[in-house]
Image (cartoon, grey):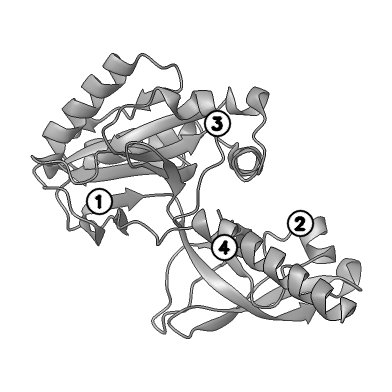
Amino acid sequence: MLKRMVFVFFGAVMSTLTAAAESTRKPPPAIVLAEVFRQSIDPALYLASEKYDGVRAIWNGHELRFRSGNHVNAPEWFTARLPSTPLDGELWMGRGKFNELAGTVRRSEPIDSEWRQVRYMIFEIPDAPGSFSERAARIEELVNEAKLPWLVAVKQFKVADIDALYDHFKRLTGEGAEGIMLHLANAPYVTGRSDVLLKLKPLQDAEATVIGYVAGKGRYTGKTGALIVTTKSGKTFRVGSGLTEEVRAHPPAIGSVITFRYQELSPAGIPRFPRYWRLREEF
């Protein structure tokens, strides 16, 4: 009888904890997503900005959440004085600091000294009226009114033609930027993936699920030589380049999702020269 009571009590406690955890989760918000820039597109119709290698975060006017819908455990001071207007942007620490940023924002207990290095780079106002050009101007106004060092309006600029676009692209990537984003200047606010938002990067990136391993040879004997992965479209291939010694010794688990980079797709739709980038972070 006592054992049964303990079991029932334990079950009730676990149910309460599970319910509390689920209360911090919400369905993923509908957000704007980028397509890949194509040579046939006129960049003069767009506003361009640097592509920040950060973590997407959506402010709904009173709470900050990741694109997954999960709550961002930011310090109270980070969000206390954010505008009541919804915002969309990237949490960012600087060029080449994604891993450091990911470690900071995933902590259940935020560390102030780390968050003092984080900037919230705003590039959109969800559900706001007007064109993107008008919304970009409103973002500048909101940031200037807030006067918070960590709240930054993403700088938007025009390019006359494709040659000017690639001049900016070469300069920014040469300085360490991840690439360029292009937002259709006259577009109303929309969600989902479309040509309203485009990305231009030195290499494309995509995600794939780990389904197996190839044993290493030579210097990698006893370690992982390559990951066998499959994409959502059902393309299966190997990813061996880019694996660090740590990843080869402790590869991503079967079923986990990785992000890889590649140059282009073959006629069969297989990524050419895929290179491991990182394990997809679940925020």
Find the distance from the CA under tag 2 to the CA under tag 3: 23 Å
User: Quadrant of the rendered structure where residue 140 is?
Assistant: top left
Q: Report x, y in % for residue 55.
A: 49, 45
User: Quadrant of the rendered structure where residue 195 is?
Assistant: bottom left
Instruction: Indicate which disc residue 244 carries.
Output: 2
For mark 4, give the secondary structure: helix
Question: Which one is nearer the viewer's eye here, 227 or 136?
Answer: 136
Query: Label 2 amino acid?
Result: Thr
Find the distance from the CA under tag 4 to the CA under tag 1: 37 Å
Instruction: State the quadrant of the N terminus.
Output: bottom right
The residue where tag 1 is placed is 197
Q: For the point 50% across and 78% down, which residue is it?
A: 231
The residue where tag 4 is placed is 19
Query: Label 4 amino acid?
Result: Ala
User: Does label 4 or label 1 sit earlier along the sequence?
Assistant: 4
The residue where tag 3 is placed is 93
Question: Would residue 282 be visible to someone looking at this image?
Answer: no
User: Does label 3 or label 1 sit earlier along the sequence?
Assistant: 3
Question: Would residue 27 be visible to someone looking at this image?
Answer: yes
Find the distance from the CA under tag 3 to the CA under tag 1: 23 Å
User: Does label 4 or label 3 sit earlier along the sequence?
Assistant: 4
Q: For the point 20% across and 31% down, which residue is it?
A: 136
